[in-house]
Amino acid sequence: MDSPLSPSSARKEAGMFLTLILLLSGRSLRAMAAQSPQGVECIVFNDQYLTCMWGSKATLTANYSLYYWYIPPRSENHMPVEECKHYLQEEGINTGCWFNHSEIIQFRPFYIHINASHGGRSLIIPTKGMKLQDLVKPAPPVNLTIQNISNNQLQLTWDSMYLKPLCLEYAVKYKSNQDTSWTEHLVSGKIFSFPSVDYEKYYTFYVKSKINQYCGTTQLWSEWSVPVFWGNNATDQGTAEEQAPWFWIHVVLPIASLMLFLVLVILLIRMERVWVILMPRIPNPSKNFEELFNTHQGNFPEWAGVSKDIVESFKPNYSESFCYVSELPPKAGSTPLWEGHDKLRAPPGRSSAPASSSSPGLSLFKNSYVGV
């Protein structure tokens, strides 16, 4: 009677059986593979994550699935086949797979199997074994710095974000403002010496990196770094990071200030209450003087109720008119008014009445006038 298999042995045999099925299915369906997208591209970005892409929505006719596994050394157990955990999609169609750092194992054969079912048929994208150490694309160099170490010699240095800098080699390209083509040099370390410079020229430098022959056989170069400038027409010498403040101060800050000013102006125009507080309106007295200009035609004395006599009295050629006063003779038997006053003022025992009506005092008041 056979002894039962241990759990580890069972997993190992199951993994090998599934791997065999996938390989056999790939060989038996090569005719159908000609109708599917050709090839898959896998890149390890800076040893941080891996992507495998096999097309786009425009070229794919089915939703493909990816399975992957590693072939370990003979002394280790067989690793199981696993499906992609993070698909990259385009409008709901799987176009690639994303692997995190923990799923990447270098210096071991890496296999993937991509298939789909469409119209009752199985579609397969042909693949082959890969070595991930040959698919590493490092990040661009950073912190480029130029130093003038002698009268005619420059020294360019930089840093790398790759965790294993000894595995990198670099390429430096430069050009002056009077050159028509770039000059490129391969460098093994993070330093480049430029032996002869012309102080009348303006130089631009770039640096990129890739895995060297001691850590892989990849031909994937990183992107070119941020440029660094040096020369007579340079706005600022030194690192690209040192040029960033100049850009922010002289370009971004003025534009941002202008936009903020325009926003404040628009808000002040729209917010009437704030506008009234900051810029009080000047009172308009025209409504109080409508009657002066409409009814009285601007005649202020007439509008103010000043009498015509007072108005006339302020004229420069004003002359006072005379008022004639005449006294009528008293009737018979009546006592003149002035006689009664004289009696009140006369001392006792004396009569203040005139002797007769024909006295000189009476004739003085008759037919006389007084100027007013």
Image (tube, grey):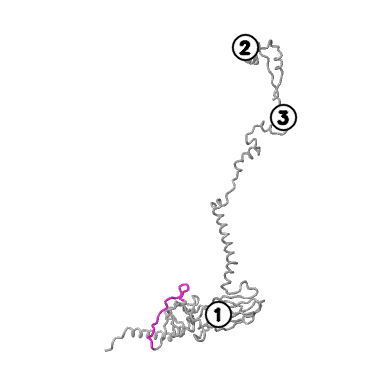
Q: Which mark is residue 333?
A: none
Label 3 neighbourhood size at 10 Å, few (<14), some (14-19), many (20+)?
Answer: few
The amino acid beneath tag 3 is Ser
What residue is shown at x 55% (from left), y 80% (from top)? 208
Label 1 neighbourhood size at 10 Å, few (<14), some (14-19), many (20+)?
Answer: many
Question: Which-is-in-front pick, marks 2 and 1?
Answer: 2
Q: Which mark is residue 348?
A: 2
Identify the residue under disc 1.
208
Mark 3 or mark 1, which is nearer the start of the sequence?
1
Label 2 neighbourhood size at 10 Å, few (<14), some (14-19), many (20+)?
Answer: few
Indicate the position of residue 281 as horizontal and vertical percent values.
58, 48
Relative horizontal placement of residue 209, taking residue 114 as reference (left or right): right
Relative horizontal placement of residue 331, taking residue 125 as reference (left or right): right
The question of residue 269 being in magenta is answered with no
In magenta, the rendered stretch is: 75-94
Q: CA distance from mark 1 to mark 3?
A: 110 Å
The amino acid beneath tag 1 is Lys
Identify the residue under disc 3.
319
Q: Quadrant of residue 325?
A: top right
Indicate the position of residue 227 as horizontal and vertical percent values.
58, 75
Residue 125 visible in the current orientation: yes
**Against 3, is 233 above or below?**
above
**Against 87, is 357 above or below?**
above
Magenta segment's dominant SS is loop
